[in-house]
Amino acid sequence: MDIDTLFALGARVGDKIVARGETLAVAESSAGGLVSAALLSRAGASAYYFGGVVLYTRRSRRLLTALTSDDIAGMRSSSPPWAQLLARHQRTRFKASWGLAETGAAGPSGNTYGDPAGHTCLAVDGPLQCERLLRTGSADRLANMLAFAMAALQLLEEAVEAAPATVPATG
C-alpha cells in the first residue's frame, strides 16, 4: 500500500459521494490529515468535501469542535464510542450527509489509555452508521498512518455503497 493507492481510493470514494449528491465532513487524529488529503486529491472535491480537522490533542478538540464536557462524559479517545461521537459531530456541525472519524495510536509506542501502537477506531455517521477497530500489530508510525487512512476510506466506501439514497444535505 502506498500514497498513490490511498489517493486513488479517496478519489473513488469522492466520485461515489458526488454521484449520490451527498457531502462529507471528517475528523481524524492519528492518520494526521491523510484521510482528508486523499479525499481532496479528487479534482472538484469542494462539491462534496465540506471540511475536516486533525484532532491530535485535547487542546485541539477544545478549540476545533463544539463538543462540551457533557458530550464527552465517560468517554476516552481512541475508543469506538469516541470515534462515533466525532463522526456524528462533524456530520451535524457541517450539515453534511456523512461524517467520518478516525482516532488511534500511530506509534512507535501506544497511547496513554493502554492501546498499542497500530490501534485505531473508525466510524461513519450518516444514512448508515458503522464502526471498525483496526490493530495493525506494527509500531511503524508512517505505515500505521497510511493503514489508518486506508481503512477509514474503505469503511466510508462500504457505508456509501450499502446506504439507501438520501436527500442531499445543504451547507
Image (cartoon, rainbow, N blue to C red):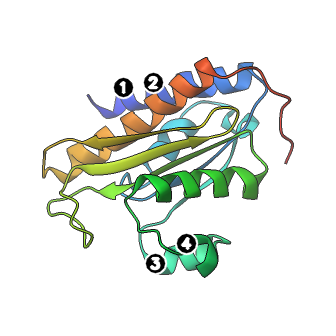
Disc 4 marks which amino acid? Ile
Q: How many marks are shown on the rendered structure?
A: 4
Disc 3 secondary structure class = helix
**Occupied quadrant, residue 165:** top right
Q: Which residue is labeled 2 in the image?
A: 8
**Residues marked 2 and 1 touching at CB (< 8 Å):** yes
* Residue at 72% in and 40% down: 46
Amino acid type indicated by mark 1 = Thr
Please tell me which of labels 1 and 3 falls first in the chain.
Answer: 1
Q: In front of the other: label 1 or label 4? A: 4
Q: Amino acid at mark 3?
A: Arg
* Residue on which the image places disc 4: 72
Q: Which mark lies nearer to you, 4 or 2?
A: 4
Q: Of the numbered discs in the image, which one, if any, rests on residue 110?
A: none
- Under circle 2, the secondary element is helix
**To which residue does mark 1 refer?**
5
Query: Which element type, helix, strand or loop, lies under badge 4?
Result: helix
SS class, disc 1: helix
Q: Mark 3 packing: few (<14 Cα in 10 Å), some, or many (20+)?
A: few
Q: Could you tell me residue 63's position as x and y percent?
A: 59, 78
Under mark 2, the amino acid is Ala
User: Nearest the camera: 60 or 91?
Assistant: 91
